[in-house]
Image (spheres, helix red, strand yellow):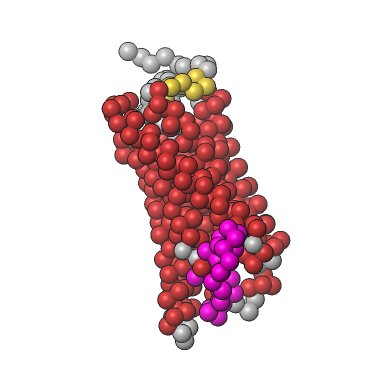
């Protein structure tokens, strides 16, 4: 049977994990708990950094932006996934699907570039400590963040406009939300140009920032090896390993989704990958970047009114150093 051109339809159907409906209650409880925990953790971190003037440095400015991005990124996807788990197959309008794709890409790509900006901040702090405060001014930091949002907007618009301007020959999206790969499955005719477009944009949005991060950390590692204090080296390496752990998790799953042709698409595997970088990474970010940080712990105790606050002394020879 020849598929009918359905480009004029007004809505799609999200199938989610309809094949494992018996697990929906458990998945709903787990995902809802993780969502609330993640939103609370990132909100607390952002509020603490904003309230404590001692944390008004470039590093913590970027961490605040990361927390806000994670909350928005998560909130674009998880509520719809929870609805899917609660009621099974659900319908989403074509406009709603396009908006979900755009904001998913917008926040996701912005986070890619923000992680690169954070690595640049550490690069300047460790490799050029004497010039750090001169270069990493408030204006420069805000410009870097604005650049991440501009890149996110550009990628989101390109993918969304091109995808939804093409005719669809199917309505059932075998996913929890309007992800690019399952939507490509529904396009009519030859989808090779769309696949190439996805890969080319992904090279810019994923590989580009990742290479900047790798270059920054190669320079950082060489600089660390030249430090005389073993304790400072250990702390610096700890900061690098934490950042690279989240970078590897986020970029690894994202690249596996977008840097391959449609022929390699596997619905069940890609659903797990999507949940990994949309749920797990935003939860790990506040833990890895801030909850292990003595300065943030001290600010938290101060904010909560604890009388005895541990004094935090920087033992590092580079400015804005993480602990």
Name above or below for residue 288 compared with residue 98: below
Q: Which residue occupies the foreground of this view, 207 or 229? A: 229
Name above or below for residue 113 compared with residue 162: below
Residue 58 found in image quarter: bottom right
Residue in view at x 48 percent, y 33 percent: 79
x and y, in percent, of residue 179 in the image: 45, 34
Residue 16 found in image quarter: top left
**Magenta stretch secondary structure, dominant:** loop
Q: Is residue 293 found inside the magenta-colored segment of the image?
A: no
x and y, in percent, of residue 119 in the image: 52, 63
Disc tally is 0
Q: Which residue occupies the foreground of this view, 219 or 30? A: 30
Q: Which residue occupies the foreground of this view, 40 or 85? A: 40
Q: Residue furthest front?
A: 307
Residue in view at x 33 percent, y 34 percent: 26
x and y, in percent, of residue 294 in the image: 51, 68
Residue in view at x 40 percent, y 53 percent: 249
Q: Is residue 43 visible?
A: yes
Name above or below for residue 247 compared with residue 199: below
Image quarter of the N terminus: top left
Q: Is residue 165 visible?
A: no
Q: Is residue 308 found inside the magenta-colored segment of the image?
A: yes
Residue in view at x 46 percent, y 63 percent: 292
- Magenta residues, start to end: 296-323
Name above or below for residue 197 compared with residue 284: above
x and y, in percent, of residue 112 in the image: 51, 52
Q: Residue furthest right?
A: 139
């Amino acid at each position: 049977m020849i598929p009918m051109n359905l480009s004029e339809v007004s809505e799609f159907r999200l199938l989610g994990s309809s094949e494992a409906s018996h697990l929906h209650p458990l998945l709903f409880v787990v995902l809802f708990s993780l969502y609330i925990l993640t939103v609370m953790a990132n909100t607390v971190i952002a509020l603490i950094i904003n309230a404590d003037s001692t944390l008004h440095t470039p590093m913590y400015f970027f961490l605040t932006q990361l927390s806000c991005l994670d909350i928005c990124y998560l909130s674009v996807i998880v509520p719809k996934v929870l609805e899917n788990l609660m009621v099974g197959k659900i319908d989403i309008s074509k406009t709603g699907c396009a908006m979900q794709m755009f904001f998913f890409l917008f926040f996701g790509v912005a986070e890619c570039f923000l992680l690169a900006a954070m690595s640049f901040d550490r690069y300047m702090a460790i490799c050029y400590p004497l010039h750090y405060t001169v270069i990493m001014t408030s204006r420069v930091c805000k410009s870097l963040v604005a650049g991440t949002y501009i890149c996110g907007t550009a990628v989101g618009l390109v993918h969304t406009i091109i995808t939804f301007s093409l005719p669809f020959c199917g309505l059932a999206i075998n996913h929890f939300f309007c992800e690019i790969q399952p939507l490509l499955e529904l396009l009519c005719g030859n989808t090779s140009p769309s696949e190439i477009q996805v890969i080319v944009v992904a090279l810019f949005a994923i590989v580009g920032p990742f290479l900047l991060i790798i270059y920054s950390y190669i320079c950082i590692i060489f600089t660390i090896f030249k430090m005389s204090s073993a304790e400072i080296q250990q702390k610096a390496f700890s900061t690098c390993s934490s950042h690279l752990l989240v970078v590897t998790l986020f970029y690894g799953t994202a690249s596996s989704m977008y840097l391959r042709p449609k022929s390699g698409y596997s619905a069940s595997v890609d659903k797990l990958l999507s949940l990994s970088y949309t749920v797990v990474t935003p939860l790990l970010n506040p833990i890895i970047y801030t909850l292990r940080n003595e300065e943030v712990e001290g600010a938290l105790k101060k904010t909560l009114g604890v009388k005895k606050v541990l004094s935090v002394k920087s033992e590092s020879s580079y400015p804005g150093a993480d602990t």
